[in-house]
Image (cartoon, helix red, strand yellow):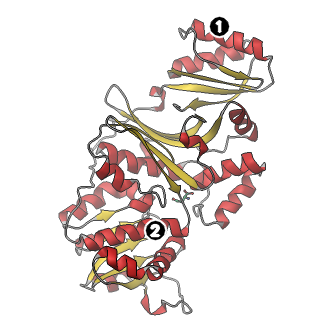
Amino acid sequence: MKKFAVLGYGTVGSGVVQLFHKNRAQIEEKAGSKMELAYILDLREFPDSPYADKFVKSIDAILADKEITVVAECMGGIEPAFSYLKQCLQHEISVVTSNKELIAQKGAELLAEAKAHSCNCFFEASVGGAIPIIRPLHRCLAANNISAIYGILNGTTNYILNKMLTDGMRFEEALEKAQKHGYAEREPSADVDGHDACRKICILSSLAFGKHVYPESVYTEGIRNISLEDAAAADELDGAVKLIASVTKLENGKILPAVMPMFVPHENLISRVDGVFNCVEVCGDAIDRAYFTGRGAGKMPTASAVMGDVIEAAKHHKTVFSQFWVDAGTQDFIAGIDELESGLFIRFEAAQDVETLQAKLSEILNEIGHENAALDVIENACVIPDKLNSQERKEILEKLNSIGIKPAHWMPVMDA
Ligand code: HSE
């Protein structure tokens, strides 16, 4: 018999409890032993719940039970989640968490604590909701030299961008719908301003490159400045505007993590991942590229990832997985956004004559040494897929401005 506990009975925690009871027989078969949900920690009262007898208000009740092998934390936030998980590990209880904020800030510390106490710290649900990405990245793709990871890592913003384009829905209305579906964070700016995606790319970057990447070191821009006009122009130029969280390995050995809206050409699968779905593209020297996609938020998809980790932790109790990274003591292995090389999408303030625009842009590209660069132009926008450095992007925008072709908004172009 393997006993486990759930911390937090909100959207995800209640989903974990529900999923365990729904699929208990097969979960126990996969875990290789009987399992019992022994405790649910929550400060609120749930007298009418069928699990009312499981509720406790203090972590001490769980720590005192020597038969607990796994604790699944679904509370969110740094404290008290961090202290609780640390105490669990010190009591040789493996921990599972869906808490991206916690892992992005305290991952190295929790992983070290887990190692010191021969336990596991699993966090599959912290990135990509239902999508298996943590374990595949760490284990199945372990033989690769990872050169880049790109992803739609926030379901709420992807849902909003999609609703704006397909239904002409206002930003606020789309956000409200995402909240009703249980996708959005308690504080909407965590989604809309890119902080949630930032935490997730920190986790993937730390895992792929072995050193803890802290959110403060990552250039982060959300979707507040994206207009319907941007979305429509991108669509006309055979692409889509997506909030992309990425990390690339640069030639100088540094890594460049970032979160920002990008123009994604339709040739890339990511451009066609809509609604609450997330998608992660992993580029490695042996695999070329691999895509992982699925529901990135919501009660049951996230519960699926948590429960998968609980099964894994229960099954491998006392076997420590090497899923690990360290705090390097510095963040100087991280490049700034000025080192980003990318193509350029520009939307203009006013409609232009397409032939004139094409000619002027070609002239400017010639002047900066990008002769015969490919160019896709419509009346109010253009895409230059050639990789440009930040100085070149700046020059193009300034030169256009100086000849009266005023850029209203620009964003980097993702590789096809
Ligand atoms: N608010 C998050 C999202 C929830 O929209 O993706 C899942 O982490």
Report if the CB atoms under discs 2 and 1 are less than 8 Å apart: no
Q: Nearer the viewer, mark 2 or mark 1?
A: 2
Residue 67: x %, y % from top left: 25, 84
Amino acid type shown at disc 1: Glu
Residue 228: x %, y % from top left: 75, 41
Label 1 sits on residue: 363
Q: Secondary structure at mark 2?
A: helix
Residue appearing at x 73%, y 15% in the figure: 357
Q: Nearer the viewer, residue 230 or 56?
A: 230
Q: Secondary structure at mark 1?
A: helix
Q: Nearer the viewer, residue 32 or 39?
A: 32
Looking at the image, residue 359 lies above or below residue 139? above
Looking at the image, residue 306 lies above or below residue 376? below
Which label was assigned to residue 394?
none
Q: Quadrant of residue 125?
A: bottom left
Amino acid type shown at disc 2: Ser
Left or right side of 295 for 319 = left
Mark 1 and ligand 1: say if the CB distance to the nearest ligand atom is below 8 Å: no
Left or right side of 389 for 365 = right
Residue appearing at x 58%, y 20% in the figure: 394
Residue 300: x %, y % from top left: 52, 70
Q: Nearer the viewer, residue 416 or 360?
A: 416
Distance Cα–Cα, label 2 vs label 1: 54 Å
Residue appearing at x 65%, y 63% in the figure: 179
Q: Quadrant of ligand 1?
A: bottom right
Label 2 sits on residue: 304
Residue 267: x %, y % from top left: 57, 34
Mark 2 and ligand 1: say if the CB distance to the nearest ligand atom is below 8 Å: no
